[in-house]
Image: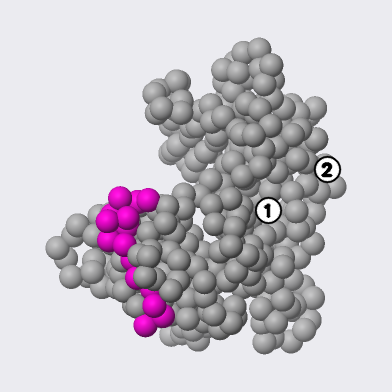
């Protein structure tokens, strides 16, 4: 009988899940993944597929349905699908762990209360992270749950990298740079140790490039600095988020354009980034095939900001030994990787065009002074590994 872990990632309009079994001490076996979509529409849609992408289950609700009921359907389907195998625990991606939580923790009533108090630091994300935890506590109170924090990996950043130049009273209230995408970067650091141990011990910049995008400077696999800060709004241009912006722009939008705080939030989080600049879409794949010049301008800005931030992070590291691309765009867009690396030729970066187009792991040319890799990330495996470790099951190494 194999132990199984369910990973959950809940958003405002969807619940994404993955089911993994601990096949042996060496590896997890992916069993299924799925999603409940269109929750806010009043007609939720549940679907699940196996490791080969074959449909395992599908269900539609024709009425508005509460979150607890939907999550209960996920848990019930999971337990039914496992059969004789046992659901050992549920692992959650929790966006914000605040200044205190630097490692995965088993959920208790006390921990849940502490995390709820962090909601003002991530008002758009934290409530969705905590909702499934509360629902499972009510429906399956004896089922172990583990909170895995997306900020935890960056707790190794030095104080100078986390501090804003604001009066210290605000820092005492939690206003500081935290960084995000930590579960993804932690996974990449582990994969590098297995694939290229010498590089993993050096100076690496990893780019989690997707609808949300950031960079992380790593020294010997530990976070030194990152482009996201107090919120997941900072740093690079993203699908619908603006990235770094002069704070004076926010004041201008409110004082001169008449936008209220809610309007500014909607603009910066949902109507900016690739979508805002192109006026077309937030999807990089569509932009890359569009003849509209605004699409190219959006892509150019996306790449420019990546290269600009790489320069800053290199100074934090005192040089650069390797560059890693990951996440949706980083893993699947050879053109974006080529554009970024072309602007880094002055550093001695040289891609192998054939390797880059074929999405192999190491994509730099043998003459490149800096190694370049494209490594798929797996936040679900990272959550499952942390969950096993936390509840006392044996988790496989990378």
For numbered disc 1, what is the local secondary structure?
A: strand
User: What residue is shown with label 1?
Assistant: 149
- Residue 13 at what x, y percent from top left? 49, 43
- The circle drawn on residue 274 is none
Figure check: 50 above or below 255? above
Image-based side of 136 in relation to 191, left or right: right
Q: Residues within 10 Å of mark 2 (few under 14, many from 20)?
A: few
The span picked out in magenta is: 346-360
Q: Is residue 340 magenta?
A: no
Q: CA distance from mark 1 to mark 2?
A: 17 Å
- Residue 325 at what x, y percent from top left? 44, 60
Quadrant including the C terminus: top right
Asked whether residue 274 is in view, the answer is no
- Residue 19 at what x, y percent from top left? 57, 30
Quadrant including the N terminus: top right
User: What residue is shown with label 2?
Assistant: 109
Identity of the residue drawn at 80% across and 54% down: 114
Q: Residue furthest right?
A: 110
Identity of the residue drawn at 42% across and 56% down: 362
Figure check: 89 above or below 308? above
- Residue 223 at what x, y percent from top left? 64, 67
Q: Nearer the viewer, residue 82 or 364?
A: 364
Mark 1 and mark 2 lie on one chain; the one further toward the N terminus is 2
Asked whether residue 57 is in view, the answer is yes
Q: Residue furthest left?
A: 291
Q: Nearer the viewer, residue 131 or 393?
A: 393
Figure check: 100 above or below 252? above
């Amino acid at each position: 009988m194999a132990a199984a872990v369910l990973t959950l990632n809940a958003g405002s309009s969807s619940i994404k899940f993955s089911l993994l079994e601990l096949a042996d001490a060496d590896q997890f076996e992916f069993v299924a993944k799925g999603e409940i979509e269109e929750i806010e529409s009043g007609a939720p849609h549940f679907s699940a597929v196996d490791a080969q992408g074959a449909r395992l289950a599908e269900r539609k609700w024709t009425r508005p349905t509460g979150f607890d009921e939907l999550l209960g359907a996920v848990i019930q389907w999971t337990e039914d699908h496992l059969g004789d195998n046992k659901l050992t625990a549920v692992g959650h991606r929790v966006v914000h762990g605040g200044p205190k939580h630097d490692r995965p923790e088993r959920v208790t009533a006390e921990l849940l209360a502490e995390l709820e108090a962090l909601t003002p630091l991530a008002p758009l994300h934290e409530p969705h992270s905590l909702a499934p935890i509360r629902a499972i506590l009510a429906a399956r109170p004896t089922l172990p749950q583990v909170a895995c924090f997306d900020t935890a990996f960056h707790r190794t950043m030095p104080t100078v990298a986390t501090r804003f130049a604001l009066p210290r009273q605000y820092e005492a209230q939690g206003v500081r740079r935290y960084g995000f995408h930590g579960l993804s970067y932690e996974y990449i650091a582990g994969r590098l140790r297995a694939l290229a141990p010498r590089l993993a011990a050096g100076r690496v910049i990893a780019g989690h490039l997707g609808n949300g995008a950031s960079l992380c400077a790593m020294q010997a696999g530990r976070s030194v600095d990152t482009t996201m800060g107090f919120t997941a709004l900072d740093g690079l241009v993203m699908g619908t988020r603006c990235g770094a912006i002069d704070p004076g722009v926010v004041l201008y939008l409110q004082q001169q354009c008449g936008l209220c705080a809610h309007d500014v939030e909607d603009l910066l989080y949902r109507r900016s980034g690739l979508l805002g600049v192109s006026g077309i879409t937030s999807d990089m794949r569509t932009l890359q095939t569009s003849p509209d010049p605004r699409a190219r301008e959006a892509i150019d800005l996306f790449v420019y900001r990546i290269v600009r931030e790489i320069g800053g992070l290199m100074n934090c590291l005192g040089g650069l030994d390797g560059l890693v691309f990951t996440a949706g765009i980083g893993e699947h867009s050879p053109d974006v990787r080529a554009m970024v690396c072309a602007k880094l030729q002055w550093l001695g970066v040289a891609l192998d065009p054939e390797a880059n187009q074929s999405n192999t792991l190491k994509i730099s040319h043998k003459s490149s002074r800096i190694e370049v890799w494209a490594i798929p990330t797996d936040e679900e495996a990272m959550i499952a590994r942390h969950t096993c470790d936390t509840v006392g099951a044996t988790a496989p190494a990378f």
